Image (cartoon, grey):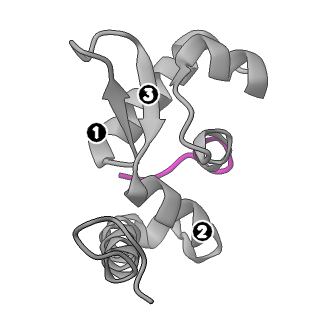
C-alpha cells in the first residue's frame, strides 16, 4: 500500500501516544474532511499501521499499532516506489522493538537486576 504523504504520517504522529481516535476527531485536528479520514484510517488499518478497537470493532475508534509506530520512526526512509518493502521493513522493525522490550522483562514483569 502506498502511503499518502504527508497525511498518513500526520495521522500516525497524532496517534503515536496510543490514544484512541475516530475519523471525525482526526479530521478536526488535521483540518481534513471526515470522509477522507475514514478512507485513510481504513487503508492504514488494512495495511496494519492502525487497527480498529472496541468490543465489536464497529466503534469507529482506531489505535496505532507497533508497525505504525515503526513506520513513523522511519518515515524519512519511505518512498512511493518501495512502499511494499517499507511495510515489510516496518513489520520487521516493530518485531525487533517488541523483542528488545521482551528482553528487558522476565515473565513476572520485573526488570532484570
- Magenta segment: does it hold 79? no
Quadrant, the C terminus: bottom left
Give residue 26's quadrant in the image. top right
Number of numbered discs overlaid on the protein picture: 3
Using the image, determine if residue 12 lies above or below residue 100: above
Q: Which of marks 2 and 1 is in front?
A: 2
Q: Nearer the viewer, mark 3 or mark 1?
A: 3
Task: Work out whether residue 99 or residue 73 is closer to the camera in this orientation and state it.
Answer: 99
Are there few (<14), some (14-19), or many (20+) residues within 10 Å of tag 2? some
* Residue bearing mark 1: 46
Q: Which x, y percent locates residue 89?
A: 36, 76
In the picture, the disc for residue 73 is: 2
Task: Work out whether residue 90 or residue 66 is closer to the camera in this orientation and state it.
Answer: 66
| Stretch in magenta | 1-8
Task: Work out whether residue 107 or residue 31 is closer to the camera in this orientation and state it.
Answer: 107
Using the image, determine if residue 77 lies above or below residue 13: below
Give residue 19's quadrant in the image. top right
Q: Which x, y percent locates residue 49?
A: 40, 48
- Tell me which numbered mark, 3 or 2, is placed earlier along the sequence: 3
- Tell me which numbered mark, 2 or 1, is placed earlier along the sequence: 1
* Residue bearing mark 3: 62
Please identify the residue farthest to the bottom as the structure is shown.
113
Q: What secondary structure characterizes most of the magenta part?
A: loop
* Disc 3 and disc 2 in contact, CB within 8 angstroms: no
Amino acid at each position: 500500500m502506498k502511503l499518502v504523504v504527508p497525511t498518513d504520517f500526520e495521522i500516525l504522529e497524532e496517534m503515536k501516544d496510543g490514544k484512541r481516535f475516530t475519523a471525525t476527531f482526526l479530521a478536526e485536528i488535521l483540518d481534513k474532511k471526515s470522509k477522507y479520514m475514514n478512507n485513510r484510517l481504513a487503508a492504514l488499518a488494512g495495511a496494519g499501521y492502525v487497527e480498529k478497537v472496541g468490543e465489536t470493532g464497529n466503534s469507529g475508534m482506531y489505535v496505532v499499532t507497533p508497525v505504525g509506530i515503526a513506520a513513523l520512526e522511519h518515515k524519512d526512509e519511505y518512498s512511493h516506489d518501495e512502499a511494499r518493502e517499507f511495510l515489510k521493513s516496518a513489520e520487521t522493525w516493530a518485531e525487533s522493538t517488541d523483542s528488545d522490550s521482551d528482553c528487558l522483562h522476565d515473565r513476572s514483569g520485573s526488570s532484570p537486576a
